[in-house]
Amino acid sequence: YFFAIFKTSLYFCAGMINSMSGEAHRPGRIEVVCGSMFSGKTEELIRRLKRAEFARQKVEIFKPAIDTRYSDADVVSHDLHSIPCTPVDTSSSILLLSSDIDVVGIDEAQFFDEGLVAVCNELANRGVRVIVAGLDMDFRGVPFGPIPALCAIADEVAKVHAICVRCGALAYVSHRLVPGGKRVMLGEQGEYEPLCRECYRKAVEEERAQGHG
Ligand code: ZN
């Protein structure tokens, strides 16, 4: 019994010393930045990570190895404002590679396996700040990969929007311009256009009238 009290007060003192030395307790959390293509998701991820890096926090970024549009070692947003990044094959690799990291960024998260949800939870439980960026829906308006589940367990969700190329309203989906039903087709400018709900509905109707889609 005495030992228990002694241990408790020892922990209490250790906690006081920690806060006195200025080492703030950082609880883990999950932040999701999602939206259509051309909505600035990756730019927002990079902004948050650069800010953490400036505060001397250890930052690491992961993306699925499938995304080979740009250089292998960089996460590159469309404005070519880049920070170093590690491509990984599966979500479980992120756990193995992020020991001793304060802030973990994950880009193009929609292409990861469903295991990413448990990985993000585990990291947050360890006290890591996890920032996930990804497409909320595919080009058919269907929730994409692990993103919906990540939104559900996240501490904070930011939905970012592109501008509808037809009417100027806020876009909600990335409409595919080339025919083909393959979902894991990576976005290049020209293959997709951001559309609002109304313009998307019209576009789908037009395609049906023309005999495809
Ligand atoms: Zn529109």
Image (cartoon, helix red, strand yellow):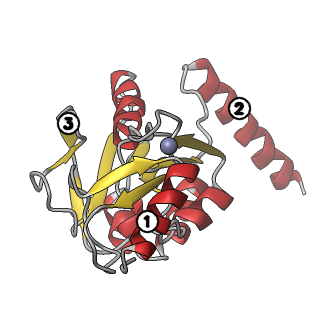
Q: Nearer the viewer, mark 1 or mark 3?
A: 1
CA distance for labels 2 and 3: 43 Å
Q: What is the x, y in percent for residue 141?
A: 52, 65
Q: Is residue 136 visible?
A: no
User: Which quarter of the figure has residue 156?
Assistant: top right
**Sequence-first disc among 2 and 3:** 2
The residue to which callout 2 is attached is 13
The residue to which callout 3 is attached is 82
Q: Nearer the viewer, mark 1 or mark 2?
A: 1
- Mark 3 within 8 Å of ligand 1, using the beta carbon: no
Q: What is the x, y in percent for residue 151?
A: 61, 57
Which numbered disc covers residue 206? 1
Q: Mark 3 falls on what kind of element?
A: strand
Closest to the observer: 16 or 203? Answer: 203
The kind of residue on which mark 1 rests is Glu
Q: Residue at x 20, y 31 (%)?
A: 81
**Above or below for 87 versus 11:** below
Q: Are marks 1 and 3 in contact (CB under 8 Å)?
A: no
**Above or below for 209 versus 166:** below
- Dot 2: few (<14), some (14–19), or many (≥20) neighbours within 10 Å? few
Q: Quadrant of the N terminus?
A: bottom right
